[in-house]
Amino acid sequence: MKFTEKPVLSVKNLSVFYGSGCEHCQTNLVKNRCRICNTIWGINDISFDVFQGEVLGIVGESGSGKTTLMRSLYFDFMPNKGSAYLMKYHQGEKSIWEASVAEQRNIKNNIMGMVYQNPLLGLRMDYSALSNIAEKILATGKRNASAINDRASELLKAVEIMDERKKEAPKNFSGGMQQRVQISKALANNPELLLLDEVTTGLDLSVQARVLDLIKNIRNNYGISILLVSHDLAVIRMLADRTIVMLDGKIVESGLTDQILEDPQVAYSQQLVHSLI
């Protein structure tokens, strides 16, 4: 696939740490903990780009920083250092972490969509599936009830939620159905970038296959860019054009997915791939 020259998302020197930090951190880390001040580095000075229509995969063991990265991009917390630029926010000239609270809401409602590993973080479980999506659309200022209902119904149909269940609360749904409602909610306002954090974890294989097919169709039909976190290399192989490998908050290898999975160059990547074959 050919990508546009300017990235949809560009992350520069991102760091997230827990503790005071010290001048010795970068030379005294044991895994991701400083042995001098005990600061834990969840993300340690990483940079990467995501291009138009691309799926960028992120792999790594538990605790490598994958989810920390995703949640910082979606303003669940602010990073300690670094910048992130979106093509549709000030033409990619201003970091999203300099945005006001109102601008952050606009970015979350219009430019990015997030699907969490835990649906409790992405859905109001006592609202109906239809209301979850309507809430996302209402946040952009739209007030035409008929148009909102039609859009929400269209999105639920696209993720194979039956009409007779669209007014039902997600708390009554299976895990796979909850993830599909999350995906439809994330797509409500045609975002440029979709963040997917372990969306198939804990799902039965047949349900995983349906969710993965749905993601492929979304990418093909909408040309949307996707940042995809998964510990499952089969998922990465199926969906990702390029892949970055994370360890202890750092990127240790990046490249075309086929190259990473077939001929990894770094010892940790080799271990990761071989352990999951």
Image (spheres, rainbow, N blue to C red):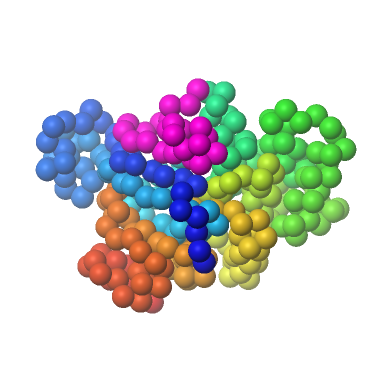
Up-down relation of residue 41 to residue 216 (above or below): above
Up-down relation of residue 37 to residue 267 (above or below): above
Q: Residue at x 46, y 53 (%)?
A: 5
Up-down relation of residue 202 to residue 23 (above or below): below
Q: Residue at x 46, y 45 (%)?
A: 9
Q: What x and y, as percent, mark residue 242?
A: 42, 63
User: Does the magenta run of residues contain 16?
Assistant: no
Q: Residue at x 37, y 36 (%)?
A: 83
Q: Nearer the viewer, residue 20 or 110?
A: 110
Instruction: Kindly tell me whether residue 81 is visible in this rendering.
Output: yes
In the image, 235: left or right of 26? right
User: Does the magenta run of residues contain 94?
Assistant: yes
Q: Quadrant of residue 24?
A: top left
Q: Nearer the viewer, residue 63 or 250?
A: 250
Instruction: Kindly tell me whether residue 214 is visible in this rendering.
Output: no
Which region shows up in magenta? 76-100
Numbered label tally? 0
Location of the C terminus by quadrant is bottom left
Q: Residue at x 61, y 57 (%)?
A: 223
In the image, 82: left or right of 87? left
Q: What x and y, as percent, mark residue 138?
A: 73, 31
Q: What x and y, as percent, mark residue 133?
A: 72, 41
Q: Nearer the viewer, residue 170 or 163?
A: 163
Q: Residue furthest front?
A: 5
Q: Quadrant of residue 14?
A: top left
In the image, 129: left or right of 59? right
Q: What x and y, as percent, mark residue 15?
A: 31, 39
